[in-house]
Each structure stands twice: as C-alpha cells, then as structure tokens.
Amino acid sequence: MATRGRPRAFDRDAALERAMHVFWERGYEATTMAELTEAMGIRPPSLYAAFGSKEALFREAVELYGRTDGTVTPRALSEARTAREGIHQALRRNAVGYTEPGRPPGCMIVLAATNCTPENAGVSALLAEDRRAMESSLRERMDRGVVEGDVPDGTDTRTLASFYATVLFGLSVQAKDGASRDELLCVVEAAMAAWDTLTGAAPLPRTPPG
C-alpha cells in the first residue's frame, strides 16, 4: 500500500531548537531566512512545509523556550519555602543561565523582539505578554507569601513585583552587553538587600533634619 507524501528528511525538534538559538542570539527581525535554513540544516521549502512561515517558526521557538530555559523562574518560585527565597533563587539562577557558556547570553523573551517595526507588532506583543506573565507570577508568589505570613501584611506586591521583574529583565540586558556572571550575581544581592525596606519589614531610613 502506497504511503502519502514524502517523509521529512530532518529532525523537526532538533531543527526547531537550532532556530530558537538563532532567534535568541540575533533577534527576530535581524534573523534572515538564510541564517535559519543554514542553522536548521534544511532548504527553504522544507522550512515552510514544516513551520509555515518565519513568524510561525518564531512562535514555536518561543514556546520551546518556555518549556526549557524559560522554566527557571517558575521552578524557583514554586520550590522555595518563602517568597523572598523564591525571588532570590529566581534572580540567581537566571543570572547563572544568562551567562552559561555555549548558549546565547540573556533571555530570549527579553531580547528577541524589543524593537520591531509595525509590520511585526504581533511578535513584539507576544513577548511583551510573556514578560507581563512573568511579572504576574512574581506577584502571585508574593501574594502567597502574604497569606502564608512570610511577607508582611500591607506590602504593595504590585510594586514589589514590578521592581524585581525590572531587575530580572535588566540582568538579561546586562548579560547581552557582556556583563560577567559575578557582576550579575552582585546585582542580585544588591536587589535582595532592598527586600526588607520594600516589604516594610524594616523602617524606612529617615532623612536627617536639615
């Protein structure tokens, strides 16, 4: 009995992973189809047949990132006994991941589509939504900390989450610009030194009378 069509002559999952690294390294708009096909080891017709378009391929690459490298923060938040520990571990583990040898620096969700032209607004919106979701996950862990008693009642968890999300995303930019792992870890410790003040667990410093 004859089979329909021709079997793909490439490993789709492996090709997608290689495409993910190209987008991560170069960004969505700067990545050309020639670079993608070369990295994936396929010809353009095979790419279009398997993935549909550059944008569709990118969206799959983002999903893959979320299932792999993008699990660092959710794992840190869920495994920690307290909200403070969860935020601390999320920042530390990402700082390590952002500077891992043999991988693109920083975070794909932060770096791959921060400045797209209007015709690629959907790509920018996709990653912006992912970043908002990440900030929401930080806030949810802080809110859980309020319920469980390790975050003081009355803490402005919205602002607190925004602050630590800004630190997290900033670590990615710093890594892209060449900051070392030790430099990023120093930033993490500086950010965590602000925790008690931001949660109201310690009194705010008073300005000496002038």
Image (cartoon, rainbow, N blue to C red):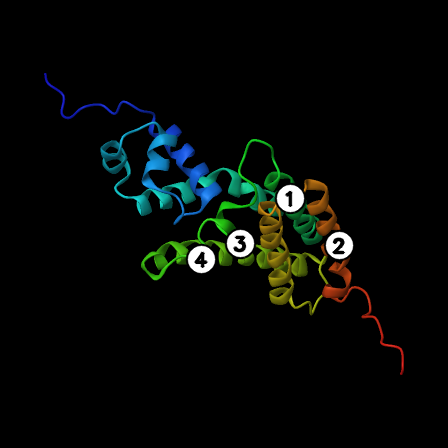
Viewer can see residue 66: no
- The spot of residue 122 in percent (x, y) is 35, 57
Which marked residue is nearer to the observer: mark 4 or mark 2? 4
- The spot of residue 95 in percent (x, y) is 64, 44
Q: CA distance from mark 3 to mark 4?
A: 19 Å
Q: Residues within 10 Å of mark 1 (few under 14, many from 20)?
A: many
Q: CA distance from mark 4 to mark 2?
A: 29 Å
Which of the numbered marks, if any, corresponds to residue 190?
2
Which marked residue is nearer to the observer: mark 3 or mark 1? 1
Which marked residue is nearer to the observer: mark 3 or mark 2? 2
Q: Residues within 10 Å of mark 3 (few under 14, many from 20)?
A: some
For label 4, the residue is 115
Which of the numbered marks, if any, corresponds to residue 95?
1
Q: CA distance from mark 1 to mark 4?
A: 23 Å
Q: Secondary structure at mark 2?
A: helix
Q: Earlier in the sequence, mark 1 or mark 2?
A: 1
Query: Tag 2: residue type?
Result: Ala
What residue lies at 47% left-to-right and 53% top-to-bottom?
A: 130
Residue, far top: 1
Looking at the image, residue 82 lies above or below residue 2:
below
Q: Earlier in the sequence, mark 3 or mark 4?
A: 4
Q: Which quadrant is the C terminus positioned in?
A: bottom right
Q: Which quadrant is the N terminus positioned in?
A: top left
For label 3, the residue is 134
Is 121 on the left or on the right of 152, as rendered? left
